[in-house]
Image (tube, rainbow, N blue to C red):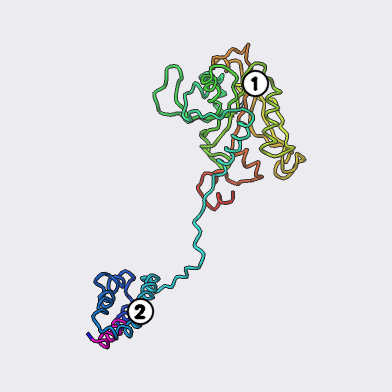
Amino acid sequence: MTGSEYIQQISQLQQAVKKDAALSAAELQQKYLGSNGAFTLLAKQITEIDPSDRKLAGRPLNELKNMLAEAITAACNHTTTDTWIDLSLPGEKPAVGHVHPISQAMAEITNIFTSIGFTRVRYPEVDWDWYVFESLNMPPDHPARDEWETFFVDHKPDKKKGQMVLTTHTSNGQVREMERLGKPPIRMINIARCYRRQQDVTHTQMFHQFEGLVVDKGITIQHLKGTLDYFAEQFYGPGTKSRIRPFHFQFTEPSFEVDFSCHLCAGKGCRFCKSGWHEVGGCGMVHPNVLKAGGLNPDVYTGFAFGWGIERTYTLKEGLAIDDIRLLYSGDLQFLEQF
Ligand code: DAH
């Protein structure tokens, strides 16, 4: 082949590369630069031409090589459609979830109590009547049971422990914890789901409670009150006070209802609290019959217990007046993303 024929072949290939602008990078690579590619073969043939012509041919051959490199780079940016993509634009951020507000409250409550030596425990949320009612000083047919709107599970009753129920309160953990440890000291915080047959704007059939239980020698109401005050300050903020008012529960004697001063108006009385106080739950000194049911001698040990709902505790903290509490479990992102 003469030098001018060789240079002609180079320019023919240049034309061909221009026409192949629509090919993909891989196709260009294979067609021109593969081991049998048109460029590769032509480049090898340079040794066949007259040495004096080689210098002349070298330059266009180099240009062809650069042209191929550019064509391949351009092909890398090809898209299958005509849409032009600006790669310098910031990407779309994926939606980021967050912990459900009730789970946040549960973590916070756990921290508050474990930092003063309580142990967080978990007990069955489908449990025997014995733990939910009878061991808590509520014999079968006792009218106090009516308050708990119980769901009964269709399961063969146990001879000693009775029927199976969905736990109506976290108090089922009291005797279970006495059994687990065998003997005091007991400092338990039991946080769990509870279930009751009620559903309206202020109630969901499934909700959460937390239950504290402390049993040891010499435990008094002062320890109970101190613990409530500590929780009030830690959870609702400095200056929040607790107040206990006489009440009746079967499993505590004496029993009280627990109020916290309104942290939004420092107990002065506002639109949210009206009286300066919010009622949250119940507490008291563990009834001797409950200690006995847990295998403890009430002449040696005394204890206190308290328990209430997490949903209310949390919404109070945030100063939230949620019209319909069921929204918390509706999976409605527009609602949940606010927290
Ligand atoms: N279990 C009660 C309820 O669900 C709340 C309660 C009251 C728990 C007094 C206690 C207590 O531990 O001592 O309404």
Q: Quadrant of the N terminus?
A: bottom left
Q: Position of residue 84 (x, y in %)?
A: 43, 73
User: Mark 2 packing: few (<14 Cα in 10 Å), some, or many (20+)?
Assistant: few
> How far across and down, in percent of the image, does residue 66 sit?
37, 77
Name the residue furthest bottom. 4
Residue at the far left in the pictured view = 1
**Residue 293 appears in which quarter of the rendering?**
top right
Residue 142 at x, y percent in the picture: 54, 20
| Magenta part, dominant SS | helix
- In this view, the residue in front, 30 or 192, is 30
- The number of discs equals 2
On the image, which quarter does residue 233 sit in? top right
Residue, far front: 52
Residue type highlighted by circle 1: Met
Residue 36 left/right relative to 311? left
Disc 2 designates what residue?
62
| First along the sequence among labels 1 and 2 | 2
Above or below, 248 relative to 87: above
> Do the numbered discs 1 and 2 sit on residues whose CB atoms are within 8 Å?
no
Q: Residue at x 24, y 71 (%)?
A: 36
Look at the image and say whether residue 12 sits in the magenta stretch: yes
Rendered residue at 50%/55% (across/down) = 95
Place of residue 185 in the rendered image (x, y in percent of width and height, measured from the top left): 60, 20
Q: Residues within 10 Å of mark 1 (few under 14, many from 20)?
A: many
Numbered range of the magenta stretch: 2-14
Between tags 1 and 2, which lies in front? 2
259 shown above or below 101: above
Q: What SS does tag 1 mark?
A: strand
Ligand 1 located in image quadrant: top right
Question: Residue shown at 62%/23% (left/top)?
Answer: 214
The residue wearing badge 1 is 285
Q: Amino acid type of disc 2? A: Asn
